[in-house]
Amino acid sequence: MSETKPTPENKPAGPTLSKMEKLVALCRRRGFIWQSSEIYGGINGFWDYGPLGTELKRNLKDAWWRDIVRCPGIGPDGKMIDMVGVDCTIIMNPKVWVASGHVGGFSDPMVDCRETKNRYRADHLLVCALNVLRKGERQALGVLAVLEGDTLVNDWLKRAEKLTKKSGGGEVQVPAAADFRKYTTLSPAEQATVIGPDTDKPGTLTEPRQFNLMFESHAGAVQDDSSKVYLRPETAQGIFANVRNVLDTSRVKVPFGIAQIGKAFRNEVTPRNFTFRSREFEQMEIEFFIHPSTAHEWYKFWRDTRFAWWQSIGLTSSHLQLREHDKDELAHYAKDGAGTSDIEYKFPFTDPGFGELEGVAHRTDFDLRQHAQHSGLNDKLKYFDQDLQVKLQGQGVPKDQIDQQCKYFPHVIEPSAGADRGTLALLCEAYNDDAARPSGVVMKFHPRMAPIKAGVFPLVNKDGMPEVAEKLFQELRQNYATDYDPKQSIGKRYARMDEAGTPYCFTVDGETLQNQTVTVRHRDTLLQERINISQVPAFLKERIG
Ligand code: GAP
């Protein structure tokens, strides 16, 4: 089966394209995101970031690291939050993944098409009966499957019309979105009659079966079961495996958190929706260790803090929602916990629905207990709570009770966010069609997130202007990602900066040489004003920090 698929980024942007198609085209054209190994036709589920995308994603990760690890603020107990970072390997001892449950249970239901050899996530397939009118009579031509998505009905219709033409013509009865059923809700007998998404024949899809999402490899020269390793499917387990090391080498005490940003790999059956579901992606995860009795307050704290954080970097509140998981939706480790919530964003391909950006879960003490048992360290992985010991001693509690109560497996609140999904949400949020601008589009990034903070241009590339502009550029680039562009008309340069989402552009012109003022162009309002060239750094500091 070929893993490559044509994607919309090769199509020219135009008024008939959806917002997502236009955004994907802009990302390609301006160097935000490209298909990985594009010169060989790409590879499904893998994406590269170009110069602008790299700055954008870095700004997101840097803001997270600064706000979470370096300056996490005050917790619900009124005390300063303790947080440290780690940077663990992608390949770990495979026993980690047995303990975490990933070897046994990290799987999705998938079906194969015997005809095309394509593979699909069974829970992403939607089916609808194809009925046509022929000479005034209704005829059933089978049940057609398509992959869920924002173009569901259109995708289905295109296939329905092609099939109808092939089998003698007729008028296709157009279904509503509500007429589609999930493939997984069909009986095996019904599933056996479905026409798969890439074939014209019924009955080519296999029954759904579980497929483990972990990528496998081998460490060392011998390739057998003894050398089998996995690319980590989450960064969390590197943190759990190092809790003892962190406690032994730093001064953190419960409650405290360990944070990590890093790559994760999942062999997704159907990667799609641009970078939303990729096979290689980056996570920004916190494992926050607490006394079990404080789980509710810390869970609420992290859920609300993380929800507010996404707004602070520019996602509009009406595009965000907090969705509390129902009891039957909870992961095995969170069944007895204070809860699990998803922070969701209204992506163009989920609209009017929402897609997960970050999960906040009370994982109880599941992971630490599992690692204690599987590593054989048992009680040595427990935490000894000295603060509690002092408190209980003060209350005159007997020693044996103190020893028992003060040694425990801490519970964990886990806010786990995707850096690529976050970057995608920032891109979707920023994208604005604007026919009044030469580029026809403006990316309104929050200034903190903008890949380029300032553009510096000499109005013309002569008459002493480049020298002044270059000096300003050299000064600004010490602190801000700055673009210097001496060529083309000023309108074209502004258009380029609108597509890059640069909040401020400074133009050196004839007047600058006389009175040391430059023009500032504000991206969002298109306002132009003059300020003294010496004031430019302070102007940016005030607005960007
Ligand atoms: N340690 C918990 C954990 O990994 P998850 O909900 O599976 O939880 C956390 O993943 C976040 O990672 C998600 O909210 C999402 O932002 C991101 N993520 C998960 N799978 C992804 C994929 N295939 N492509 C891009 N991002 C993904």
Image: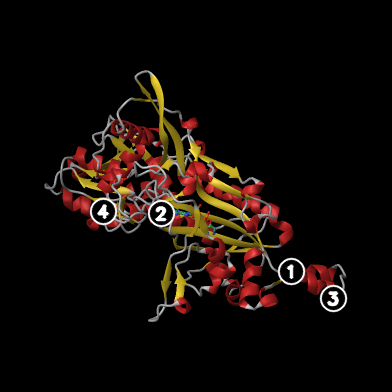
- Circle 3 packing at 10 Å, graded few (<14), some (14-19), many (20+), is few
Residue indicated by mark 2? 278
Of residues 381 and 452, the one drawn nearer to the viewer in this rendering: 381
Residue indicated by mark 1? 387
Q: Earlier in the sequence, mark 1 or mark 3?
A: 1
Q: Nearer the viewer, mark 1 or mark 3?
A: 3
- Circle 1 packing at 10 Å, graded few (<14), some (14-19), many (20+), is few
What type is the residue that disc 2 sits on?
Answer: Ser
Residue indicated by mark 3? 399
Q: CA distance from mark 3 to mark 2?
A: 53 Å
What type is the residue that disc 1 sits on?
Answer: Asp
Q: Earlier in the sequence, mark 4 or mark 2?
A: 2
Residue indicated by mark 4? 473
Q: Is residue 312 above or below residue 370?
A: above
Q: Earlier in the sequence, mark 4 or mark 3?
A: 3
Q: Quadrant of residue 437?
A: top left
What type is the residue that disc 3 sits on?
Answer: Lys
Quadrant occupied by the N terminus: bottom left
